[in-house]
Image: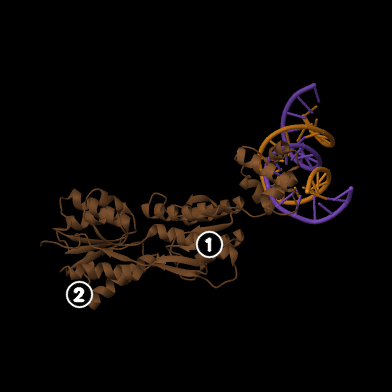
Chain colours: A brown, B orange, C purple
Amino acid sequence: MLTIHEVAELAGVSKSTVSRVLNNNGYVNEETRRRIEKIIQEHQYKPSAAAVSLSKQIGSTIGVVIPEIDNTFFGEVLKGINEVADQNGFSIIYCDTQNNGDKELKALSALEQQRVRGVIITPAMGYGDKESVDKLKNALAKLDVPVVVVDRDFDYSQWDTIYFQNYESGYIATESMIQAGNKKIGIIQGDMQLKIARERFRGYQDAMAANGLEIPEQFVLKGDFTIETAYELTKRMIESKVLPDGMITCNNRTSIGFIKAMIEKGITIGSDIAVVGIDNVPMLDVLGFPFSCVSRDTIEMGRMSMKLLMERMNKPDVQRSIWVAPCKLELNGSEKTNR
DNA sequence: GTGCATCAAGAATCTTAGCA
DNA sequence: TGCTAAGATTCTTGATGCAC
């Protein structure tokens, strides 16, 4: 790859003149300009992003901190972020915290060293108390760059935020199950330290109460948003020989764990037991498995987070922005049973 | 209209001093 | 003389102020 120095040599000018042509500022003789532009085009010269950052004292790299790189949900969010970043000349550094607060602080420290221009973060933990929020706040303050929080909103947050209609998703999922004729409806909760899990559960509780149904406590399973826990909890529930009419699964991974246990034990979803998940599991559609869920446009959430970050870069003093991704009910048959 | 000099951060390389 | 540690210098690339 050519450097500005080599372009200058080929054009018979100094690199200052090439720089003026590149940035379209200062005086440059029209003939000299045309000659330089021709060389740039012929050699497909592109200025080094690292050197431009160094020179301008501003980076073109965005740090994205996510808690589960192997979760398809975050894969799609990243896709949306990448799309907008790419269109606007930003590159991305990804950090996976594996839902670990210490790893999150390390990742932010690494991004500080990289001198990123902004950070998009899905917090690793619930941050339900002021002390842990302060730790995160301090780490982000050290970076001194715009921040956007995605998906996991939490109390005391002060940053631009993009999240999902968590309460509504819990409510709609439960309501759809009730409309399908189910009465004894359980739920596999998410990690209740997270606000999103508490909100989804609250939606479930309110939908049950609004329809005059009691919550069957033995079918309120204390999950943590992982496949493994959902699988174990579902297996134990099946082994107890008593099943509810249907279950709400609180995220895509919980749905996978639930379905895996059901298949293993020979129980047919949509016939022996109903299920409505929060978040889609695209792979089930590919496999022809009818799965009803409350979905959201995750790629759009990624796009919006990057757009919000760029807006914050341009206008650092405007009020905090919050964008709520709408939820959409997709009924494919698993909300019913033949019992 | 043009080019020199300078600046930025940090790694790599070179130089120097001190000691055994 | 050889080794180590510390400090100084060089190098990378692009932007820009200022002199000619």
Q: Position of residue A60 (x, y in %)?
A: 59, 53
Q: Which residue is mark 2?
A: A213
Q: Secondary structure at mark 1?
A: helix
Q: Which residue is mark 1?
A: A309
Q: Position of residue A19 (x, y in %)?
A: 70, 48
Residue A95 appears anywhere in the view: yes
Q: Amino acid at mark 2?
A: Leu
Q: Secondary structure at mark 2?
A: loop
Would residue A103 appear left or right of A190 to someone viewing this image?
Answer: right
Would residue C13 appear left or right of A275 to someone viewing this image?
Answer: right
Would residue A146 appear left or right of A150 to someone viewing this image?
Answer: right
Q: Residue at x 21, y 76 (%)?
A: A211
Q: Residue at x 19, y 48 (%)?
A: A264
Mark 2 burial class by Cα count in 10 Å: few <14, some 14-19, many 20+: some
Classify residue A334 by image quadrant. Answer: bottom left
A187 or A50: nearer the viewer: A50
A273 or A311: nearer the viewer: A311
> Which chain does the residue under circle 2 lie in?
A
Kindly check if marks 1 and 2 are in contact, taking CB atoms under 8 A apart as contact.
Answer: no
Q: Amino acid at mark 1?
A: Leu
Classify residue A217 by image quadrant. Answer: bottom left
Q: Residue at x 52, y 51 (%)?
A: A92
Mark toward the start of the polypeptide (1 vs 2): 2
Q: CA distance from mark 1 to mark 2?
A: 43 Å
If the image is split into quadrants, where does the C terminus of chain A sit?
Answer: bottom left
